[in-house]
């Protein structure tokens, strides 16, 4: 699916990967619905883009997820692409995980994408298909002490995505997963708890590189897309 003329919802759009992808999609001629909690930054970004609707939302709240999708339907008549990018880290050893922290991260990293996928599916079916891209993490393919709680939420998202991909294939809805590695964004400054552990020696990806991977997922419909293919990074 090409981005030109498509209605695209981007969550976590006020900074980092979400912002970078929103700018890329705008250059391609997409019509955007930008969702995030930070109203000022979201509205400033939307004002810079030719056709973008900012919707302030805490995606851990089901009614607010529904409101984002409803705003897209009201403004543009439907949805072609959903990019589930909003997420938060929890970087502490397993024995130190606080249940309230874990629950909050599960709500944002797993429940919110599920609810958004369910909300857009009828609209995509009505248009004959669509593309859903769930932004996961390359940590799900490793065992890294100190981030088990975070990576477990993304591992669950991977499985949810793979199953939805099979279930919705007949509807023409392609569900893809993008696997960023460490990315040069504000992510590690806004962890739910803990701090960056290990990986300091790894060259961080740019948000723009990950945005290109998201575009590639939309265009190809591939099940899995890496900003840098595994063989290239080996």
Image: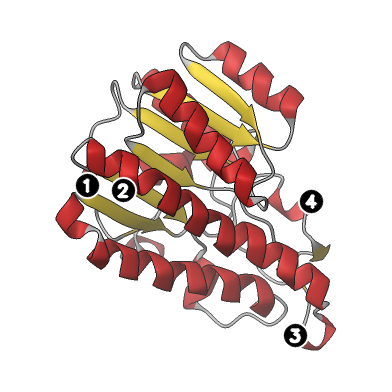
Q: Is residue 24 at least partly visible in the picture?
A: no
Is there CB contact under 8 Å for labels 3 and 2? no
The residue that label 2 is drawn on is 217
The residue that label 3 is drawn on is 94
**Marks 2 and 4, how far apart at CA:** 27 Å
The residue tagged with tag 4: helix, strand or loop?
A: helix
- Seen as rendered, the residue at the extreme bottom is 95
Q: Position of residue 42 (x, y in %)?
A: 66, 26
Classify mark 2: residues with Cα within 10 Å, few (<14), some (14-19) or many (20+). many
Who is closer to the viewer here, 102 or 66? Answer: 66
The residue that label 1 is drawn on is 220
| Mark before the other along the chain sequence, 1 or 3 | 3
Q: Residue at the location (42% across, 53% down)? A: 118
- Is 221 located above or below residue 128 in the figure? below
The residue tagged with tag 1: helix, strand or loop?
A: helix
**Marks 1 and 2, how far apart at CA:** 5 Å
In the displayed structure image, the side of residue 177 where residue 2 appears, left or right: left
The residue that label 4 is drawn on is 189
Q: Position of residue 143 (x, y in %)?
A: 57, 83
In the displayed structure image, the side of residue 143 where residue 119 appears, left or right: left
Q: Quadrant of the C terminus?
A: bottom left
Q: Of the residues tagged 3 and 4, which is closer to the observer?
A: 3
Q: Position of residue 73 (x, y in %)?
A: 42, 28
**Marks 3 and 2, how far apart at CA:** 33 Å
Is there CB contact under 8 Å for labels 1 and 2? yes
| Mark before the other along the chain sequence, 3 or 4 | 3
Is there CB contact under 8 Å for labels 3 and 4? no
Residue 210: give its label: none
**Marks 4 and 1, how far apart at CA:** 33 Å
Is there CB contact under 8 Å for labels 1 and 3? no
Residue 32: image quadrant is top left
């Amino acid at each position: 699916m090409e981005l030109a003329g498509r209605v695209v919802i981007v969550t976590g759009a006020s900074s980092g990967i979400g912002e970078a992808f929103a700018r890329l999609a705008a250059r391609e001629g997409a019509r955007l619905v930008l969702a995030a909690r930070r109203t000022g930054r979201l509205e400033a970004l939307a004002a810079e883009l030719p056709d973008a609707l900012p919707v302030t939302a805490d995606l851990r709240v089901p009614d607010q997820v529904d409101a984002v999708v409803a705003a897209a339907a009201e403004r543009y008549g439907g949805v072609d692409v959903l990019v589930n990018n909003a997420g938060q880290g929890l970087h502490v050893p397993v024995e130190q995980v606080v249940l309230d922290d874990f629950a909050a991260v599960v709500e944002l990293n797993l429940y919110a994408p599920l609810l958004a996928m369910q909300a857009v599916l009828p609209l995509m079916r009505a248009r004959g298909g669509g593309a859903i891209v769930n932004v996961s993490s390359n940590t799900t393919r490793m065992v890294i002490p100190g981030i088990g709680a975070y990576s477990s939420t993304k591992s669950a998202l991977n499985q949810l995505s793979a199953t939805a991909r099979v279930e919705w294939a007949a509807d023409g809805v392609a569900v893809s997963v993008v696997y960023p590695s460490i990315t040069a964004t504000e992510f590690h400054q806004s962890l739910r708890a803990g701090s960056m552990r290990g990986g300091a020696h790894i060259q961080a990806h740019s948000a723009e590189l990950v945005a290109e991977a998201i575009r590639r997922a939309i265009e190809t419909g591939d099940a899995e897309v890496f900003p840098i293919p595994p063989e290239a990074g080996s």
